[in-house]
Image (spheres, rainbow, N blue to C red):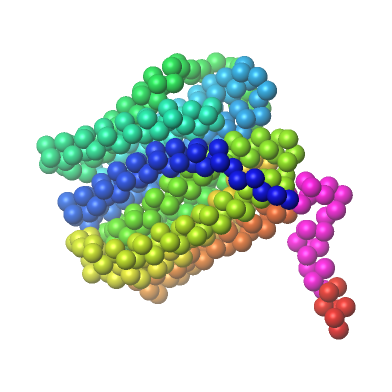
Amino acid sequence: MNFAFPAHLVRRLMLMIGGEAMQSGFHFALNLALLHLLSAQGYGLFALAMVMGGVGLSYIRSLTAVPATIWMSKSTNSAGVDAHDVTFGSAALVVALLLGLGTGLLMRLLGDPSGIGAACFVGAWSLRSHMRTAFFARRMQLVVSISDAVFTFVGMVLAAVTIWLFADALQATFYALAAANLIGIVVLVRLARRKLRISFRAPTWRRYARLWPQLCWSGFSATTTNIQGQCLALLVAGIAGPAAYAPLAAVLVLFAPLRIISLAFSNMTQPELAKLMHRNETARVWTQARIWALVMGLGSLAYGCGVLFILPMIKSQALQGVSTGVIGLLAIANYVPIMLYVMPRVVLEIMSDFRIVALITMGGAIVGLALIAVILAIAPPTWALAGSAVSETFVLALSWYFARHRMWNIEHPNDKRDSWFGSWRRAAALATHRR
């Protein structure tokens, strides 16, 4: 099959990555500033708040943003699009409030005096993430990019002013980030000339409840994904303390742009691939998935090599004399698999195979938790990244296997040769024939 270069997708990607790059650059600069301003304990708390923000984004993505993109793309009229927009938007507000509350309680347990600032930050960030994804589904990339630019500028100004004026730089930063996210939401709504349509009436919840049999697996997938992806931070901070996590966080923050880029790829490709799948153009879906995966894999490897080059230049008390080169190499071993399994996961999601995604990440979480716990018992916290890398590689292998398996079953409904058992049976038959 000839592959037509998707120039329109590249244009959309540039807009999306432009917005994501601005935010990522701001978060990166803020992390570097706080790395030198805060103690190891304080920076560890900030890093954990960012981790909780990532957890919030994953739940918002799984329970509201991705389902909204899929069902809005499948809707054949504007009424259906609006109905799903209101339903998932209302659910996103509830999820964001719950995530903020959970973050505040966790931060208090870990040493944050109040936890309120972190709660406001995570809640506002999660809600803005849902709205960005919903507007991407409506093909309003330019509006979202302008909103991202406003968020970045306001965030930089507010963070600088609050850090300068207030003695408690950690809490001031949390409130500045929360305010910047709220302003980004306001700009997004105003530029799109749309009203915030939130409804908690019975028809809205009935519509959401009808989709719950699939969404519950999506929510379970978010839980297992967070355990699998964040078990490193939670175990190191829980067992060795936030200060022990600070050196890992100081290096891993340099790789944060890769997660932002992976999210941009997901937001860009998901509506397009969902429409292709709805038209049964499975060959085009699979071709685009493989090509974009190759692009992301090679790009992440090149990015990791660049990070290794600049790591020796970073000096901070939070590093506590730990070898940043070792952490950098282990981080590359984590992030290259992450970038490589973005596309098969998107393929499984647009086919509403949330159960398979959940089971894959649950297996990865079990592997990761076990290995990291063992490593922390016998080696310094730095080497816990090795257990996390094995977990990500496990998820990578299974994601591609099951995505290919599902695509084969759709293309050949009467031919199950691509099943796991069938693969072993063919291999055994081939070996017998050779003998």
Residue 313 in which image quadrant? bottom left
Relative side of 300 to 309, left or right: right
The residue depicted at 75 percent of the width and 61 percent of the height is 420
Residue in the picture at 61% in, 34% down:
70
The x, y position of residue 178, in whole percent, is 30, 33
Q: Residue furthest bottom?
A: 435
Q: Is residue 315 above or below residue 152?
A: below
For this view, does 53 lie left or right of residue 80? left
Q: Work out whether residue 253 or residue 291 is closer to the camera in this orientation and state it.
A: 291
Compared with 226, 219 (above or below) is: above
Which residues lie in the magenta part? 407-428
Q: Nearer the viewer, residue 428 or 41?
A: 428
Q: Nearer the viewer, residue 273 or 60?
A: 273
- Residue 91 to residue 108: above or below: above
Image vertical order of residue 82 relative to residue 378, above or below: above
Percent x, y of residue 92? 48, 29
Q: How many marks?
A: 0
Tell me if residue 198 can be seen.
Answer: yes
**Does any portion of residue 217 appear in the rendered image?**
no
Q: Is residue 269 left or right of residue 376?
A: right
Question: What predominant SS class does the magenta segment belong to?
Answer: helix
Q: Is residue 61 magenta?
A: no
Q: Residue 131: image x %, image y %?
A: 46, 29
Residue positioned 50% across, 60% down in the render: 298
Provide residue 310's location: percent of width, then percent of height: 29, 63
Direction from residue 202 to residue 246 in the image, left or right: left
Q: Quadrant of the C terminus?
A: bottom right
